[in-house]
Image (cartoon, rainbow, N blue to C red):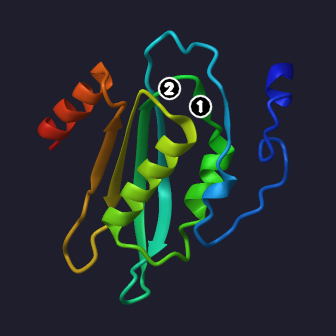
């Protein structure tokens, strides 16, 4: 635990400062103690909200994030604050999922990452966008292609 205190994390252990507009700069990382192991890390955010960019109506979703880390991992409280920052952001479902994926890839440079949005139906239609990333030139790029091709 002492090592984690020295990593310069700003959110963990402090009062949460929620921002309701898109704020990727709140994301923080810490060092992975097991970068030589391949293992999955999964986050579920069952209370994600954003706004329809056309009507301004709220959209509700469960956002699922799964990744195989390399050297850096996302700190969970900063991820919570980041996801909350979409609350008053006008964005289509597909945009939310792709922006989240791209921000996390830029932040961590993971071996593999995928993001799924399970959006609550509006107008009788559910939308479940899925985006993934595998590090180019590695077996994780192949994993990304396989998972995308077999995604249901």
Quarter of the image for residue 97 reads bottom left
**Relative to 66, is 37 above or below?**
above
| Disc number for residue 121 | none
Front residue (pair 136, 33): 136
Q: Position of residue 121 (x, y in %)?
A: 27, 70
Which residue is labeled 2 in the image? Answer: 69
Q: Is residue 96 left or right of residue 12?
A: left
Front residue (pair 124, 116): 116
Per the image, label 2 sits on a secondary structure element best described as loop
Instruction: Judge the density around disc 2: few (<14), some (14-19), many (≥20) Cα neighbours within 10 Å.
Output: many
Per the image, label 1 sits on a secondary structure element best described as strand
Locate the N terminus by quadrant.
top right
Quarter of the image for residue 57 reads bottom left
Locate the C terminus by quadrant.
top left
Q: Position of residue 39 (x, y in %)?
A: 44, 18
Q: How many marks?
A: 2
Q: Position of residue 50 (x, y in %)?
A: 47, 71
Which residue is labeled 1 in the image? Answer: 73
Instruction: Judge the density around disc 1: few (<14), some (14-19), many (≥20) Cα neighbours within 10 Å.
Output: many
Q: CA distance from mark 2 to mark 1?
A: 6 Å
Front residue (pair 64, 69): 69
Q: Is residue 41 left or right of residue 114?
A: right
Q: Please report contact status of discs 2 and 1: CB closer than 8 Å, yes or no.
A: yes
Q: Position of residue 40 (x, y in %)?
A: 43, 24
Query: At 47% across and 42% down in the image, what residue appears?
Result: 105
Q: Is residue 13 left or right of residue 39?
A: right
Front residue (pair 28, 63): 28
Furthest residue in direction bottom, as rendered: 55
Furthest residue in direction top, as rendered: 36
**Relative to 117, is 64 above or below?**
above
Quarter of the image for residue 66 reads top left
């Amino acid at each position: 635990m002492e090592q984690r205190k020295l990593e310069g994390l700003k959110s963990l252990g402090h009062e949460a400062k929620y921002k309701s507009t898109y704020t990727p700069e709140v994301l923080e990382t810490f060092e992975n103690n097991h970068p030589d192991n391949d293992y999955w890390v999964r986050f579920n955010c069952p209370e994600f909200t954003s706004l329809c960019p056309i009507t301004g109506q709220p959209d509700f979703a469960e956002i699922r994030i799964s990744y195989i880390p390399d050297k850096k991992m996302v700190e969970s409280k900063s991820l919570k604050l980041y996801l909350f920052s979409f609350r008053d952001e006008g964005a289509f479902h597909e945009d939310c999922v792709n922006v989240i994926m791209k921000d996390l890839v830029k932040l961590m440079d993971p071996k593999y990452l995928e993001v799924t949005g399970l959006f609550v139906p509006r107008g009788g239609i559910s939308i479940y966008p899925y985006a993934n990333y595998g590090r180019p030139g590695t077996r994780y790029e192949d994993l990304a292609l396989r998972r995308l091709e077999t995604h249901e």
